[in-house]
Each structure stands twice: as structure tokens, then as C-alpha cells.
Image (cartoon, rainbow, N blue to C red):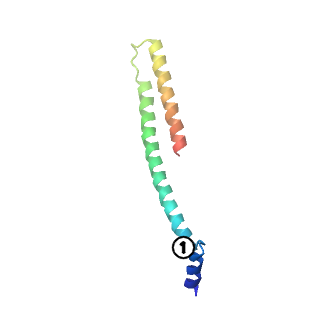
Amino acid sequence: MQSLHRRLSRMRGERTNDDEKIEQEAKIKQLRFELEQKQATGSVLNEQIKRVNVCTATIPTTTTTTTITTTITRMQFFASIQRTLIHRCV
């Protein structure tokens, strides 16, 4: 009896619980894939931020103050971009 009812519902174009479940499972699979990609991107960006922070700590003392300031400003700019990208990915 239930299978007959489901068949009639499908013929009328009504959605069944099975159809919705299949769509939801597909959506979950897609979202999990996207989450894994964004987490991987976040890990890469975190590593880059660490490298930038190490670079700012190891600038040679023979460099002029202006060059150091310019380099630090650039690195901070790129680090802020990376943090923004991480925030958007998560």
C-alpha cells in the first residue's frame, strides 16, 4: 500500500522522504568536501604566516631602518591578507 502511495506521489511530482534524504546526503557530501578544502587552505596559510613572522624576526642588523620598516610593513600587509583569507575560508 505504501509503495503504491509513493508511486502516485512521484507521478504527481511530489517529493518523497527518500528523494529528500538522497538530496540531503549529496549536499552533506559536497559540504564536507568543501570543508576539507578550506581546512587544507587554512593550514597552508597558517604555515605562510609563521614563515612571515620568522622572517620579520631574522632581518639582519646591517639593513637600514627605512628598509626594515618597509619590509615589516609589507610582511604585515601580506599577513593581514592571509588572515582575512583564512577567516573567509572558515
Is residue 17 or residue 48 the one in the foreground?
17
Q: Position of residue 61 (x, y in %)?
A: 40, 15
Q: Is residue 81 above or below residue 14?
A: above
Seen at 51% across and 38% down, the residue is 85
Q: Is residue 77 above or below residue 4?
A: above
Residue pointed to by mark 1: 18
Q: Is residue 64 above or below residue 40?
A: above
Seen at 42% across and 41% down, the residue is 44
Q: Position of residue 6 (x, y in %)?
A: 57, 80
All told, the count of numbered labels is 1
Q: Position of residue 2 (x, y in %)?
A: 58, 84
Instruction: Say which quadrant the N terminus sits in.
Output: bottom right
Seen at 48% across and 18% down, the residue is 70
Is residue 90 or residue 4 the one in the foreground?
4
* Residue at the front extreme, as displayed: 12
Q: Position of residue 75 (x, y in %)?
A: 47, 26
| Residue 3 location, quadrant | bottom right
| SS for dot 1 | helix
Is residue 2 or residue 7 the one in the foreground?
7
Q: Is residue 42 above or below residue 67?
A: below
Please tell me how crowded label 1 is: few (under 14), some (14-19), or many (20+) other residues with Cα within 10 Å: few
| Residue 12 location, quadrant | bottom right
Q: Amino acid at mark 1?
A: Asp
